[in-house]
Amino acid sequence: MKVEHINPFVKASTDILSQMAGLTCKLGKIYIKNETFNAPDVSILIGITGDLKGRAVLNMNKLLGLKIASHMMGGIDIQAFDEISRSALAEIGNMIMGNSATHLSSEGTIIDITPPTIIFGDSLLIHTSDSKPITIPLESQHGKIELDIAVS
């Protein structure tokens, strides 16, 4: 993945998380993970096709996932992930990646994205066989979100 492709993901993530989830995110140090890595309780997986091929995984802990879903649903108190809160998380992932695609397009890189897949569980282990993911850590007032981009 070229360095110039990272900024569109950073901009889309911080903008959407601010607008739709009420989070003020500070960019941490971007780094490369191993092909297999542990993820927190909630992962939003979105495939990427086109000029870049691979996947993006938005990772967060359960509490932050519930806060994001609650904010997107007008502040309703959410204690567990139900169909509506899962849909809200899928939509935040879709919006981040859709905006990333728009930013990349303005730079001449065309991508399409797949519908989001939400994965919940303790001690998730994610394996990206084709490339090591670039991790974009975002620190918010309610916890850390990591966007892992593995493309070729």
Image: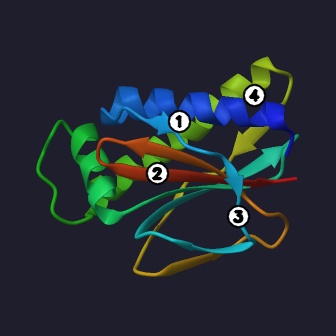
Image coordinates of residue 137 in percent, x first then y, are 55, 48
- Label 4 crowd (10 A; few <14 / some 14-19 / many >=20): many
Q: Secondary structure at mark 1?
A: helix
What residue is rendered at 61% in x and 34% in y?
10
Q: Quadrant of residue 80?
A: bottom left
1 and 3 marks in contact (CB < 8 Å): no
Most foreground residue, 56 or 3? 3
Sequence-wise, the earlier of marks 1 and 3 is 1
What residue is rendered at 46% in x and 35% in y?
26
3 and 2 marks in contact (CB < 8 Å): no
What's the CA distance linking mark 1 and mark 4? Answer: 13 Å
Sequence-wise, the earlier of marks 4 and 3 is 3
Q: Which residue is mark 4?
A: 104
> Disc 2 residue type?
Ile
Residue 93 got which mark?
none
What residue is rendered at 29% in x and 47% in y?
142
Q: Which residue is mark 1?
A: 13
Sequence-wise, the earlier of marks 3 and 2 is 3
Sequence-wise, the earlier of marks 1 and 4 is 1
Q: Secondary structure at mark 2?
A: strand
> Disc 3 residue type?
Lys
2 and 1 marks in contact (CB < 8 Å): yes
What's the CA distance linking mark 4 and mark 3? Answer: 23 Å
Q: Quadrant of residue 131?
A: bottom right
Residue 33 got which mark?
3
